[in-house]
Image (cartoon, helix red, strand yellow):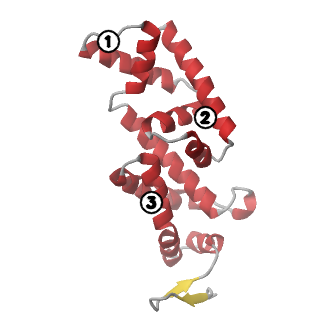
Amino acid sequence: MAEPQMTTPDGHQQSVASDEVLMAHLQGGDAVAGDELVRRYAKPLLGYLARVTGNPQLAEEVHQQTWLGVLEHMNRFDAQSGVGSFKAWLFRIATNKATDVWRSRARQRKMEDGLRLMEDESGQDAASPLEASEAQDRVQRAIDLLPEAQKQVVLMRYYANMKFTEIAETLGCPLNTALGRMHKATLKLRETLGES
């Protein structure tokens, strides 16, 4: 069955099928439907990821991983099952992929904010590179112990420099929920780091 078409200002034919219809076609093996979804969301998704990651190259990498995730999990998408719109599903995948990248990159770079938290608690700076490295490892282990929802907020706040309004929008939760998760995470980190 042919999809309704419209002519763009540059003379090209463009599908006016809904995202969900295109997704159903993609699930049926229609690669052209997948191309149309990528075309529709390339600009907003890249813009979102650039804002979330703060790095255009990293945003492009996560963008590619997001579409691979769509292809890998496309049979899980069913608009009637309560997963929501295709756009919401796509952006959830993008957020999860960005979180995965933050986790891996967080292990590769200094955790300056975590070190400041430790310094505030101890009242002294790490004396040597070895001590600083050990301190970074302690902070990373403490972050890894947080519940997933709290960990996401910490990673978005400190590793993507996102505002709390952006965090709430990304996670699809009220602003007060994002703030509450950060508060609980901070208390838990202080408790964990104070014990060790």
Please name the amino acid that badge 3 sits on.
Leu
Q: Is residue 83 above or below residue 111?
A: below
Q: Nearer the viewer, mark 1 or mark 2?
A: 1
Which numbered disc covers residue 44? none
Residue 89: image quadrant is bottom right
Q: Which residue is drawn at 38% across and 57% down?
A: 60
Q: Is residue 4 above or below residue 66?
A: below
Mark 3, Cα crowd under 10 Å, few <14 / some 14-19 / many 20+, is some
Say which element carries label 2: helix
State which tag comes first along the sequence, 1 or 2.
1
* Relative image position of residue 164 (x, y in whole percent): 57, 39
Q: Which residue is drawn at 46% across and 66% down?
A: 43
Residue closest to the far left:
129
Please name the amino acid that badge 2 sits on.
Ala
Q: Is residue 7 above or below residue 114?
A: below
Gap between marks 2 and 3 measured at Cα: 24 Å
Say which element carries label 1: loop
Say which quadrant the N terminus sits in: bottom right
Q: Dot 2 corresponds to which residue? A: 149
Which numbered disc covers residue 46? 3
* Relative image position of residue 57 (x, y in whole percent): 33, 53
Q: Dot 1 corresponds to which residue? A: 126
State which tag comes first along the sequence, 3 or 1.
3
State which tag comes first along the sequence, 2 or 3.
3
Please name the amino acid that badge 1 sits on.
Ala
Q: In this view, does 5 lie above or below 73?
A: below
Gap between marks 3 and 1 measured at Cα: 39 Å
Say which element carries label 3: helix
**Numbered label tally:** 3
Q: Residue at x 56, y 71 (%)?
A: 26
* Relative image position of residue 182 (x, y in whole percent): 59, 29
